[in-house]
Amino acid sequence: MAKVKPFRGVRPPREFVEQVASRPYDVLNSQEARAEAEGNPRSLYHIIKPEIDFVDGTDEHDPKVYDKAVENFKAFQNEGWLVQDDKEHYYIYAQTMDGRTQYGIVVAANVDDYMNGVIKKHELTRRDKEEDRMKHVRVQNANIEPVFFAFPDNRDLDEVIKTVTAGEPEYDFVAPDGFGHTFWVIDNDALIDRVTKAFDKIPYLYIADGHHRTAAAALVGNEKARLNPDHKGDEEYNYFLAVAFPASHLKIIDYNRVVRDLNGLSPAEFLEKLEKNFIVKDMGTVTYHPERLHNFSLYLEGRWYSLTAREGTYDDADPIGVLDVTISSDLILRDLLGITDLRSDKRIDFVGGIRGLDELKRRVDSGEMAMALALFPVSMDQLIRIADTGNIMPPKTTWFEPKLRSGLVIHKLD
């Protein structure tokens, strides 16, 4: 069962929250962070992407950059831009996009739950990326940015969310990207106890987004436990920062592909070879969106095509074989285009559905890419089934939006 606890959050006073809050470290590069933080000394980018405080081109992995992150985190607290709560709380964090709102509970999740598989993953992690994030957690002795979890819908937690969100929020603002962010502090001891007990009845938590951050946070906590001769198990480092959402609140959007060349095939030859495993229909020049599972959208030489996988090319009884990312990776990218490693092959790139299919069209029309492939999005049920069966999704399968805003609350490890 999932073990969570309230914690003394470190967070900005209400008047500073919009200046402090930022996008997550991994959705923008150093130049973009530098531009977004320009003229704003309170931006969290000074802590999570501190290379922006050095000359352009400074290696983000330089030891002096990590030192600057620590210096800036301390400065934010000294200046009163980040202040630690006097008592332990849970928090409610709501995000609104396109008129749809999802409500998450901000918790301190348990390190042992990750180690023991109570917190389930659906993606592989790379050790180099884990180590980079671990350095940040170690030097700060804090989880600066939260990870994004899902949990099976729970009536008690639904009632807590409803009760708390009927009150006045601590923060309520619209970020520059147009997404709304609203945040409540759970201050009532009875409600805090109710949250803890409700999670104690939930068998599993699921990593929705942030596999590397989750691994890094848990591994640092585990490391601290091993190095502490007086370890008891109730120390703050046994927990890490997470926002957990009821699964029914979440919507996964499409994660699409663009490819630089057709592996020596002409467009006509490529379309002809597709016919073996797909029903191919020319949809003309009007943008075509995949309509259902096993239906794909192909953009090639200024035209859109509907590709429907033929029966027998997939296995709906197989949690991985049923995925459209598996079908397209095997039957198109591998068999026709010779792309076997989605993580490292430079001929392929990936475009989150938040950018729309117009971005696919633009990259092909510019001549940068030869073709684009849009996929029907994975469902939360599919994600949970894969995690429950111990399977791993292929790379670049899920895209969650909106992203969690960083800087609304931070968790210290001491």
Image (cartoon, rainbow, N blue to C red):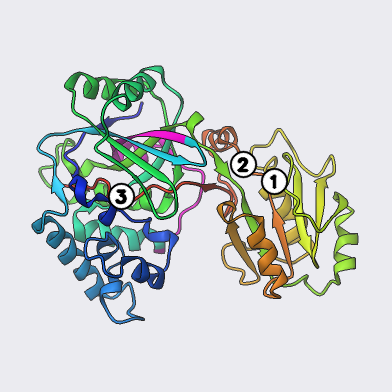
User: Is mark 2 in CB contact (under 8 Å) with mark 1?
Assistant: yes
In the picture of the structure, the residue carrying the numbered disc 3 is 217
In this view of the protein, can residue 118 be seen by the observer?
no
Nearest the viewer among 232 and 306 is 306
Query: Mark 3 is on which residue type?
Result: Ala
Q: Is residue 125 magenta?
A: yes
In the picture of the structure, the residue carrying the numbered disc 2 is 378
Q: Is residue 12 magenta?
A: no
Label 1, label 3: how far apart the Cα atoms are:
31 Å
Image mark for residue 365: none
Image mark for residue 324: 1
Q: Residue at x 78, y 70 (%)?
A: 262
Residue 97 place in picture, x, y as percent: 48, 42
Q: Secondary structure at mark 1?
A: helix
Looking at marks 3 and 2 on the same chain, the residue that comes earlier in the sequence is marked by 3
Residue 304 place in picture, x, y as percent: 80, 57
235 left or right of 164?
A: left
Query: Mark 1 is on which residue type?
Result: Asp
Residue 135 place in picture, x, y as percent: 27, 62
